[in-house]
Image (cartoon, rainbow, N blue to C red):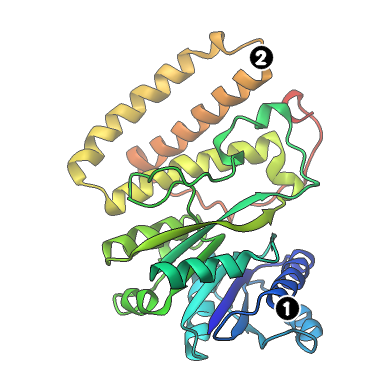
Amino acid sequence: MIAVCICTCGRNAELRACLEAVAAALHAHPPGGGALVVVADNAPGGGAEDVVAELAARFPCPLVAVREPQPGISFARNTVLREALARGADAVACLDDDDVPQPDWLHHLEAAWRASGAELVFGGWNWCADVRLAPWQEDLKIFRTPAFEGTNRWGLPSGAGTFNVLVARPLIERLAARGPVFAPEFALSGGEDVDFMIRAVGAGATHAVAPRSVVLRSWDAERLTFAGVMRRAFRVGNLRALHDRNHDDPRRWRKKRRRIARALLAEVASLPWRLGSRKRLAAWAFEVTRLAGEVYGRWFGGRFQYYAAPRRRAVAGGALTR
């Protein structure tokens, strides 16, 4: 049996759209060994249970909700995994609550899993049709859909993430025997997914890709503003430093500290050559902010609590947001 696992926090409308798409996919392509859908609600006031209760009666498989009162994505992920395994899942397929899976998303994940025997199978994502990126956003890496070309520095497929992944039960059990599957230290900063994948590789996990397994992504308006993109850039750099601190060779860590500081100074000095083009200026701002986040982590041991920061309302002002 495959358990579809979704963590949510105060995004009931997005959760409903996600679950309705999951239901359509399970109707169209039911998994060979049966299916289960588990939703972990991490919102202080709850709310996801009402969405689940409304949809459960007409769902094509059991649909259950569990509460995780401890704030943080790591705690919600660990809760949803425990519930899935307790109900007999042989594998879990993880989705983000604000993504909408395509009708054959799980079919392709399952096919790649059964054909390869891999313990991690990664799918991709694409933008929803109603998302319109501004010209200054188009070349930024965070807006590029995964191509799965080559591997990253941890030996994982480039573009891999837990937004669309199937994880086999034996891998979850091996990691759980050593401690929390998703590390609590990343609960409010994010990055728990990359940390999980790095440790999975260290535990001997094999992996495969299912490029035809696709979920559609639609970010909220705040994340698409210039301020929202820069917050994410700082987070990207900060998490890179934190992952290196936990998993990289200490000698390389010390060398990278000096190199990153020099790179930040050089990037700041290059500003005059970026003026005159919104695209070049946005790329410069993103890289400076990313490097600043990395310096914050490498030199000061700082952790940017991305999910704890107050979410500002989307604004239309500013030259780069138009």
| CB under 8 Å between discs 2 and 1 | no
**Disc 2 from disc 1: Cα separation:** 49 Å
Q: Is residue 97 left or right of residue 315?
A: left
Amino acid residing under circle 2: Ser
Amino acid residing under circle 1: His
- Callout 2: SS: loop
Of marks 2 and 1, which one's residue comes earlier in the chain?
Answer: 1
Query: Mark number for residue 85?
Result: none
In percent of the image, x 79 and y 89: which residue is there? 57
Residue that mark 2 sits on:
277
Percent across and percent down for residue 322 are 79, 28
Percent across and percent down for residue 126 are 65, 49
Q: Nearer the viewer, residue 107 or 37?
A: 107
In percent of the image, x 31 and y 77: which residue is there? 174
In percent of the image, x 38 and y 71: which residue is there? 117
Q: Is residue 299 left or right of residue 14?
A: left
At label 2, counting other C-alpha atoms closer than 10 Å, the crowd grade (few under 14, some 14-19, many 20 or more) is few
Percent across and percent down for residue 56 are 75, 86
Q: Is residue 102 left or right of residue 238?
A: right
At label 1, counting other C-alpha atoms closer than 10 Å, the crowd grade (few under 14, some 14-19, many 20 or more) is some
Query: Mark number for residue 27?
Result: 1
